[in-house]
């Protein structure tokens, strides 16, 4: 071994879903929105001025912070924006999970959490979801260095009831509790109203799913101003200019169009409900997803086999070869037309 090798920060990185280069595929594998962003986003993009790119962007991202604050009925001091919610969550781990006690998150959850914990050398424990993939709040009564979970959970799509979230908060007032609401806009209840009551709560959301801007990388955290200040201190100790000028302009255009947001999220929820019904008829079972994906298992056909068969037809879904979930497929809700092709294939394959 060469001497410098012992100085390396070794990590096992997160594996993002596949982004195939070829066109004409049906892409239901990374929970992207099948609809384009709000029309104002394209206008804002056309108006971007290449000449201005010689200047650094506003490090405080104030136009976007203010637009998000207005949309959420919060004060700008309560908003922190980042390069997708992955960036926001990574900053939260670095800022708030700096104690010696293990942080807690469910055994089946967003597979980036253990990666951040490892890269930042944060100890963690993963209380098991019950057999229905529900969180038992009592698992979070123990001493810990912080709590994080998505709501709805990923990759299960299961919503954690508000009483359970508040129960977890009530028992964890000495640590920071983060609710990752990447998928909340497709029909689940946000923990945002609890911000008034719990000053240790952070709610994180993203423009990637419900606002069709995964490619632009915009996410945000909402919390009391003191926590936002700590987050900004760490951000400014890392990279002052996280949000580029284009992201700022497009983010503002996106969040200002509430009507478009409501129409497209409702359309996806309607397609999800229709898809659920057809999947049940085909012998699949799943929990009642409140997100833009369905986490389903088939009564007789193994998930890996289905995954491969779908892929051979250029229909991409996500498969996780992990304990407890290796017989499930996570199927992103696409357009009605895409879901029809997907369901038609399954109907013939499973015959
Ligand atoms: N949280 C959860 C639960 C997710 O599934 C994702 C998407 N991979 C993210 C956060 C991050 O999304 P983004 O960085 O695009 O905002």
Image (cartoon, grey):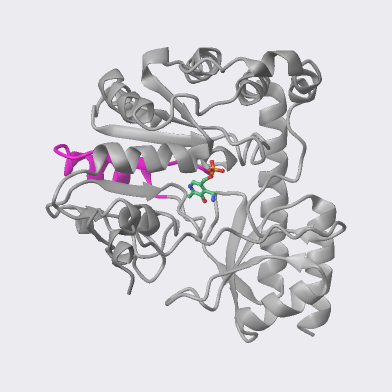
Residue 87, position as x, y percentages in the image: 46, 39
Left or right for 122, reference 299 = left
Q: Which one is in front, 253 or 186?
A: 253
Q: Quadrant of the C terminus?
A: bottom right
Residue 293's place in the image compared with 307, above or below, is above
Q: From this viewpoint, is residue 191 visible?
A: no
Q: Which one is in front, 70 or 125?
A: 125
Left or right for 209, reference 199 = right
Q: From this viewpoint, is residue 74 visible?
A: yes
Q: Which residues are magenta?
A: 160-182
Residue 249, position as x, y percentages in the image: 65, 19
Residue 100's place in the image compared with 173, above or below, is below
Q: Residue at x 39, y 57 (%)?
A: 115
Q: Residue at x 75, y 60 (%)?
A: 20
Q: Residue at x 85, y 56 (%)?
A: 23
Based on the displayed image, in which of its 4 quarters is residue 134 positioned? bottom left
Q: Residue at x 75, y 18 (%)?
A: 50
Q: Quadrant of the N terminus?
A: bottom left
Give the residue at the far front of this rendering. 2
Based on the displayed image, in which of its 4 quarters is residue 163 positioned? top left
Image mark count: 0
Give the residue at the far right of this rendering. 24
Q: Which one is in front, 59 or 304?
A: 59
Left or right for 111, reference 7 = right
Q: Say whether residue 171 is magenta.
A: yes
Q: Say whether residue 265 is magenta.
A: no
Residue 27, position as x, y percentages in the image: 74, 58
Residue 121, position as x, y percentages in the image: 26, 54
Residue 332's place in the image compared with 176, above or below, is below
Left or right for 249, reference 136 = right
């Amino acid at each position: 071994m060469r001497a410098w090798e012992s100085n390396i920060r070794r990590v096992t990185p997160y594996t993002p879903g596949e982004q195939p280069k070829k066109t004409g595929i049906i892409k239901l594998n990374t929970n992207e929105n099948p609809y384009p962003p709000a029309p104002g986003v394209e206008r804002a993009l056309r108006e971007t001025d290449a000449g201005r790119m010689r200047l650094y962007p506003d490090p405080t991202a104030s136009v976007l912070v203010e637009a998000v604050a207005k949309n959420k009925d919060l004060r700008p001091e309560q908003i922190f924006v980042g390069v997708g919610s992955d960036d926001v969550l990574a900053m939260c781990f670095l800022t708030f999970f700096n104690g010696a006690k293990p942080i807690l998150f469910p055994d089946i959850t967003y597979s980036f959490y253990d990666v951040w914990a490892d890269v930042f050398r944060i100890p963690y424990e993963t209380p098991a979801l019950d057999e229905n993939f529900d969180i038992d709040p009592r698992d979070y009564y123990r001493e810990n260095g912080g709590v994080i979970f998505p709501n709805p959970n990923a990759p299960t799509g299961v919503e954690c009831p508000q009483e359970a979230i508040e129960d977890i908060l009530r028992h964890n007032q000495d640590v920071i509790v983060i609710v990752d609401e990447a998928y909340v806009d497709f029909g689940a209840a946000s923990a945002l109203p609890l911000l008034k009551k719990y000053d240790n709560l952070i709610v994180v959301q993203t423009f990637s799913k419900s606002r069709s801007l995964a490619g632009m990388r915009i996410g945000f955290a909402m919390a009391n101003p003191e926590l936002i200040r700590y987050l900004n201190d760490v951000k400014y100790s890392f990279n002052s200019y996280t949000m580029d000028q284009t992201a700022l302009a497009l983010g503002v255009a996106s969040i200002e169009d509430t009507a478009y947001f409501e129409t497209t999220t409702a359309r996806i929820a309607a397609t999800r409900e229709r898809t659920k019904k057809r999947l049940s008829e085909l012998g699949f079972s799943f929990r009642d997803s409140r997100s833009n994906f369905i986490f389903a298992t088939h009564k007789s056909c193994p998930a890996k086999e289905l995954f491969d068969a779908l892929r051979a037809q250029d229909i991409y879904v996500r498969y996780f070869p992990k304990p407890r979930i290796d017989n499930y497929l996570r199927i992103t809700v696409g357009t009605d037309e895409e879901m029809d092709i997907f369901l038609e294939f399954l109907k013939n394959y499973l015959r």
